[in-house]
Amino acid sequence: MLKMMRFSFCVYIVVLVLFGSSCRNSDKDGFVSLVKEWEGREILFPVDLVFTVQEDTVEHLGNDTNYKIVTYVDSVGCMSCKLQLLRWKEFVLELNTDCSEKVPFLFYFYPKNKAELDFIIRRDTFNYPICIDEEDGLNKLNHFPTDMAFHTFLLDKENKVVAIGNPIHNSKVKELYLKIIQGEKIGEKDEDKTIRTKVDISKALISLGKFDWQKEQKAVFVLKNTGDKPLVIQNVATSCGCTSVEYSKEPVRPDNSLELCVTYKAEHPEHFDKTITVYCNAASSPIVLQITGTAR
């Protein structure tokens, strides 16, 4: 009974950090079901795949550590947007600086265009072991969820899932991973201490229309603090490296507003739908904003 209660609480925490307390009940039920399905599940690895660093073959690492992080990137959509290699480099460095035991990262990429993937890896000077899984063997063995939010896993020594979620796209998932690896107690205590406020958004989706792909585009989102406590922006994450955000880091007083200035710079002609996720001390956090348009 105790084990079941601990498991249910862990599932609650994972769903909370992934999607916040504001998601609809139907969505939350689906997330809980998915997390329950994967919690404690063993990830299977193909035996015939090799890891390389800048095309040089390296030894597969991670069998003798307490934890490892596995991330899988499929061939759907913008490869550069999904990879976010520069942000992964920052996280690998941060994690292995803060933790007493080095945590292996296993990157599995299933590219639609291998030449494009090779270019991105060289461009971002990504000098960590990767596996180019051209037959999609890892996914065929494990049948990952279709939602890319569930393509990254924190595994224990037996390759069983301890937590699920992408720490690059979600700062709360990142905090959760760090706490688990560092042996900190996971619970609601910290959440309960957070001073909450309310936020009103004038527009959560902005269409940039059609434009020359070589010209950068800008959009401004306005967040108004309608609560009685200061609004504090903890982090802002974008779904793509071609999207950047500028905003004031100062707390926003009640009845005042904050502007998020979003810049989109296309790498090539495309129809796009990008998300900007705002983590803050509002009850509705994380707040998801969108820009759409067609770069011609």
Image (cartoon, rainbow, N blue to C red):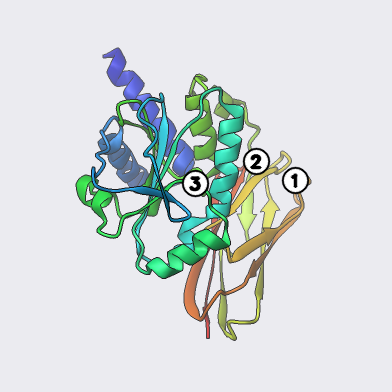
Kind of residue indicated by mark 3: Tyr
Say whether disc 1 or disc 3 marks the residue closer to the N-terminus. Answer: 3
Q: Residue 128 shows which numbered tag? A: 3
| Identity of the residue furthest to the top in this view | 2
Neighbour class for label 3 at 10 Å: few (<14), some, many (≥20)? some
User: Residue shown at 47%/57% (left/top)?
Assistant: 83
Instruction: Residue at 58%, 85% (x, y): give it.
Output: 211
- The label on residue 125 is none
Instruction: Inspect this view and state whether residue 192 appears.
Output: yes
- The amino acid type of the residue labelled 1 equals Pro
Q: Foreground mark, 1 or 3?
A: 3
Query: Where does label 2 land, which residue?
Result: 197
Q: What separation in Å lies between label 3 and label 2 (alpha carbons)?
A: 41 Å
In front here: 35 or 177? 177
Horizontally, is 5 left or right of 95 in the view? left
- What residue lies at 35% left-to-right and 63% top-to-bottom? 75
For the residues labelled 1 and 3, the Cα–Cα distance comes to: 45 Å
Q: Residue shown at 53%/86% (left/top)?
A: 296
Disc 2 secondary structure class: loop
Confirm or deny contact between disc 3 and disc 2 (CB under 8 A): no
Q: Position of residue 128 (x, y in %)?
A: 49, 46
Query: Which residue is under mark 1?
Result: 254
Q: Is residue 219 above or below residue 60?
A: below
Whether residue 202 can be seen here: no
